Image (spheres, rainbow, N blue to C red):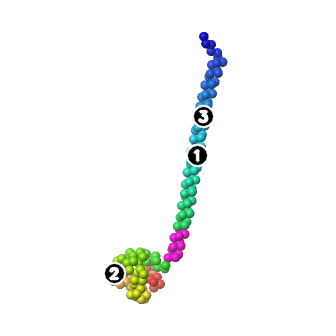
Amino acid sequence: MIVVTSAAIVAVSQQSEIGHLTSKNDALAAAKAHAIRQRNTARHELDAAQHALDALAVQKARDEAAARSIEAHRPPGATLFATHCAACRGIDGEGGIGPQLLRGAVAGRLTEADEVSVVTNGRGGMPAWGVGGLAPGDSSSPEQIQ
């Protein structure tokens, strides 16, 4: 016959409770480790995102500086040409609806005064740009036309 004492029951009960607590502690430790890994991953992702934003800010500053440099070195009248002439003459003056201006194509046929007159007064299908046409709100000067 097996005699079970109350001390034996208490001992088994305590071992069971200790095993249960150990399992809970293991689960908590695993959850804590997982949370730490997630936090570290999130920090890494935030650092990478910040690095990318910093790189974009640097590139934007470089692009803006390059644009200012290009604008500063743009020949006088380039904006006016792009706005008013390029549709017919081509973006680089290569010709299109109107004759080629590139590489001095017109320079040999017209004097500078004649060129200013054509732009100011128009000729054939070309509109006259001399009365407020090139610079909004005021007459275009020969210097602007040149």
Residue at the far right in the pictured view: 7
Three-letter amino acid code of the residue under disc 3: Asp
Give the mark toward the camera: 2 or 1: 1
Mark 2 Cα-neighbour bin, 10 Å: few <14, some 14–19, many ≥20: few
Q: Nearer the viewer, residue 130 or 17?
A: 17
Three-letter amino acid code of the residue under disc 1: Arg
Q: CA distance from mark 2 to mark 3?
A: 88 Å
Q: Nearer the viewer, residue 136 or 29?
A: 29
The structure residue drawn at horizontal position 61% and vertical position 25%, both measured from the top left corner, is: 16
Q: Nearer the viewer, residue 126 or 98?
A: 98
Q: CA distance from mark 2 to mark 1?
A: 70 Å
Q: Which residue is mark 2?
A: 125
The structure residue drawn at horizontal position 45% and vertical position 85%, both measured from the top left corner, is: 142
Mark 1 Cα-neighbour bin, 10 Å: few <14, some 14–19, many ≥20: few
Q: Secondary structure at mark 1?
A: helix
Query: Which labelled disc corresponds to residue 26?
Result: 3
Q: CA distance from mark 1 to mark 3?
A: 20 Å
Magenta segment's dominant SS is helix
The structure residue drawn at horizontal position 38% and vertical position 80%, both measured from the top left corner, is: 100
Q: Nearer the viewer, residue 123 or 109?
A: 109
Q: Earlier in the sequence, mark 2 or mark 1?
A: 1
Q: Give the quarter of the figure containing the C terminus.
A: bottom left
Give the mark toward the camera: 1 or 3: 3
Q: Please tell me whether residue 20 is drawn above or below residue 89 in the rendered image.
A: above
Identify the magenta region: 64-74
Quadrant housing residue 65 = bottom right
Quadrant housing residue 52 = bottom right
